[in-house]
């Protein structure tokens, strides 16, 4: 099984984080979560769920939640081996901080560690439209080996619900980490 760090920032799209963590745990993987203060607030607003209660109710020994300012957390060190990191959703503020190396909290430090250690790092950026500054920061991250996966619906799959769209995005993210899952349907042609 894999060990994946999952970050969540204050951007809209908390359902993507929720589904990612649920699927990773359901598949038996070890998950380290780090959420910004705004992420917890947006999570509550968008999903009508308390973030801490959601994590607690998952009731998994494989789920570890780190505080955003705990720079002594395992995930702050490159010596703590992981199979990668997902930030879902990732705000443009976080993109900018990661792109410019300002490790002022655990989530950004963990991303910095993954990049410097050349570990798989994936972000699901949430903003529309992208400004030139956003695009420059995303390009910097891409050139540093970060995989950028905007949450773009695969309409050719004819999704019926928001959950169908979210599952396709999460399935694609897990594919990047070579995690077998049944969320994403592959295009089989016409």
Image (spheres, grey):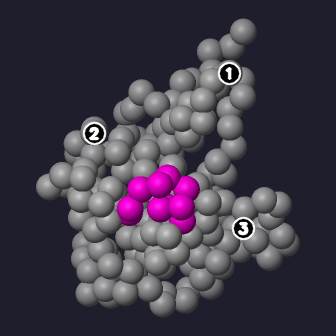
The quadrant in which the C terminus is found is: top right
Query: Percent from the top left, x then y, of residue 186?
Result: 57, 24
Q: Nearer the viewer, residue 4 or 168?
A: 168
Magenta region, main secondary structure: helix
Which disc, if any, is residue 84? Answer: none
Q: In percent of the image, x 38 and y 62: which residue is there?
A: 50
| Secondary structure under the numbered disc 2 in the rendered image | helix
**Looking at the image, can residue 63 be seen?**
yes
Which range is magenta? 42-51
The quadrant in which the N terminus is found is: top left
Which disc, if any, is residue 158? Answer: 1
> Image quadrant of residue 160?
top right
96 left or right of 29 in image = right
Q: Nearer the viewer, mark 1 or mark 3?
A: 1
Q: Measure the C-alpha gap from mark 2 to mark 1.
A: 26 Å
Q: In percent of the image, x 14 and y 55: which residue is there?
A: 61
148 left or right of 40 in image = right
> Image quadrant of residue 34?
bottom left
Q: Measure the C-alpha gap from mark 3 to mark 2.
A: 33 Å
Query: Percent from the top left, x then y, of residue 116?
Result: 45, 76
Query: Percent from the top left, x then y, of residue 137?
Result: 71, 74
158 left or right of 36 in image = right
Q: Which residue is mark 2?
A: 26
| Residue 173 colored in magenta in the image | no
| Secondary structure under the numbered disc 3 in the rendered image | helix
Q: Which residue is mark 3?
A: 139
Q: Measure the C-alpha gap from mark 1 to mark 3.
A: 31 Å
Q: Is residue 180 above or below residue 79?
A: above
Q: Earlier in the sequence, mark 3 or mark 2?
A: 2
Mark 3 Cα shell of 10 Å, populated few (<14), some (14-19), many (≥20): some
Query: Percent from the top left, x then y, of residue 21?
Result: 37, 50
């Amino acid at each position: 099984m894999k060990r994946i760090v999952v970050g969540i920032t204050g951007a809209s799209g908390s359902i993507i984080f929720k589904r990612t963590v649920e699927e990773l745990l359901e598949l038996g993987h070890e998950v380290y979560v780090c959420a910004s203060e705004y992420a917890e607030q947006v999570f509550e607003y968008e999903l009508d769920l308390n973030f801490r209660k959601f994590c607690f109710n998952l009731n998994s020994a494989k789920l570890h939640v780190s505080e955003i300012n705990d720079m002594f957390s395992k995930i702050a060190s490159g010596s703590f081996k992981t199979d990668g990191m997902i930030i879902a959703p990732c705000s443009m503020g976080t993109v900018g901080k990661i792109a410019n190396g300002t490790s002022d909290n655990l989530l950004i430090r963990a991303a910095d560690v993954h990049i410097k250690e050349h570990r798989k790092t994936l972000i699901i950026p949430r903003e529309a439209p992208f400004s030139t500054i956003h695009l420059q920061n995303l390009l910097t991250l891409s050139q540093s080996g970060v995989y950028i996966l905007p949450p773009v619906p695969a309409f050719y799959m004819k999704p019926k619900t928001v959950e169908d769209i979210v599952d396709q995005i999460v399935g694609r993210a897990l594919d990047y980490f070579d995690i077998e899952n049944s969320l994403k349907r592959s295009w089989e042609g016409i």
